């Protein structure tokens, strides 16, 4: 098997002017829509080894599958990450780190473990950039920009266009 | 509790105002680097000057520095640049929705003048 080149991790950070617990509660919220995370629904038990899934709002599709690695409320949450839109790929690792700063919380996301075997690593970074901006808007103003709500409404009508690998049955069949 | 939706971009603007700091950001955009390797790319500047610039970049949020053993790795954080863009660039561009509203207004006005004529 050819040796894949390992790529450097992506590290991104944003400052949000709300208490650290508010950020933690939002990013670990399960069972209801997380607007900053592309309107997905998180299903997880917050303990190491537990299975993690991000579903589409209608629960028909799974965007991300993983396993919880580390949980240290309200400071650190890390998990493995299989991006189901790309089919079956080796896992990468996502780490959320929250730190108290004057006036609020510094939120840092590290996405690591990309190799040349992964498709669209750069798009993952662009995605997190957008997510962090939406998280700031959601927590500071209670809503996200109109443009994004419009995009979500469109996305909701287009789930039939998503790759088969995101269907719940396919995910289960793949052993996730 | 309603927090102010505030982004203090002043430190980012100050960080971007220096040509060498902009060059450092361009270099880090290609991939993170340990401090020593980054400094080696700026042989005309003392190690001390490079460290000063990195400190300004870190304080602005444009660079995230992480210790890995005895080395410190410098990562470019793209978020502040996105915030600059959102605040100063995107709102100066005409969005398609604004164009559609203009088209609607124009067509309605033409329709009215047809009736009046």
Image (cartoon, helix red, strand yellow):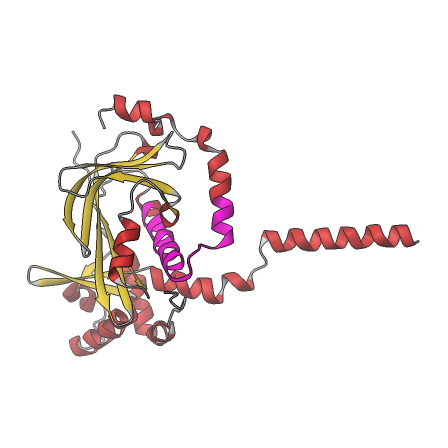
Query: Is residue A12 visible from the viewing direction of this image?
Result: no
- Residue lying farthest front? B1
Up/down of A143 relative to B19, above or below: above
Q: Nearer the viewer, residue A1 or A94?
A: A94
- Residue lying farthest right? B117
Rendering coords of residue A79 (x, y %) = 19, 43
Up/down of A172 relative to A30, above or below: above
Up/down of A38 relative to A158, above or below: below
Residue placed at 38% from the left, 67% from the top? Answer: B3
Whether A150 is among the magenta residues is yes
Query: Is residue A119 visible from the viewing direction of this image?
Result: yes
**Which quarter of the figure has residue A168?**
top left
Residue placed at 47% from the left, 55% from the top? Answer: A145
Q: Which residues are magenta?
A: A124-151
From the image, give the main secondary structure of the stretch colored magenta: helix
Q: How many callouts does the rendering have?
A: 0
Q: Nearer the viewer, residue A56 or A160?
A: A56
On the rendered structure, is B72 left or right of A167?
A: left
- Residue lying farthest left? B70
Rendering coords of residue B102 (x, y %) = 69, 55
Rendering coords of residue A82 (x, y %) = 25, 36
Rendering coords of residue A89 (x, y %) = 25, 33
Whether A69 is among the magenta residues is no
Residue placed at 16% from the left, 29% from the top? Answer: A1
**Which quarter of the figure has residue B71?**
bottom left
Quadrant where the C terminus of chain A sits is top left
On the rendered structure, is A13 left or right of B113?
A: left
Q: Nearer the viewer, residue B49 or A148?
A: A148
On the rendered structure, is B26 left or right of B37?
A: right
Residue placed at 51% from the left, 53% from the top? Answer: A146
């Amino acid at each position: 098997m050819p040796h894949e080149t390992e790529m450097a991790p992506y590290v991104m950070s944003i400052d949000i002017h709300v208490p650290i617990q508010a950020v933690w509660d939002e990013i670990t919220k399960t069972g209801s829509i997380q607007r900053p995370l592309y309107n997905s629904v998180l299903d997880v038990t917050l303990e190491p080894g537990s299975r993690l899934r991000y579903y589409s709002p209608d629960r028909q599709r799974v965007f991300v599958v993983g396993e919880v690695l580390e949980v240290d409320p309200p400071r650190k949450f890390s998990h493995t990450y299989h991006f189901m839109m790309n089919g079956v790929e080796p896992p990468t690792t996502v780490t959320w780190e929250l730190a108290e700063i004057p006036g609020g919380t510094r939120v840092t996301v590290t996405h690591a473990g990309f190799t040349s075997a992964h498709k669209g690593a750069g798009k993952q970074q662009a995605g997190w950039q957008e997510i962090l901006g939406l998280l700031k808007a959601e927590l500071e103003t209670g809503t996200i920009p109109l443009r994004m709500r419009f995009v979500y409404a469109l996305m909701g009508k287009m789930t039939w266009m998503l790759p088969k690998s995101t269907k719940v049955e396919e995910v289960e069949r793949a052993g996730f | 509790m309603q927090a102010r939706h505030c982004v203090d971009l002043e430190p980012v603007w100050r960080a971007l105002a220096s040509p060498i700091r902009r060059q450092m950001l361009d270099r880090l955009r290609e991939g993170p680097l340990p401090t020593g390797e980054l400094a080696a790319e700026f042989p005309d500047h003392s190690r001390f000057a490079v460290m000063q610039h990195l400190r300004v970049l870190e304080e602005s949020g444009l660079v995230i520095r992480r210790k890995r053993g005895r080395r410190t790795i410098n990562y470019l954080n793209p978020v502040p640049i996105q915030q600059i863009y959102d605040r100063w660039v995107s709102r100066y561009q005409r969005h398609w929705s604004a164009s559609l509203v203009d088209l609607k207004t124009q067509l309605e006005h033409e329709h009215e003048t047809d009736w009046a004529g």
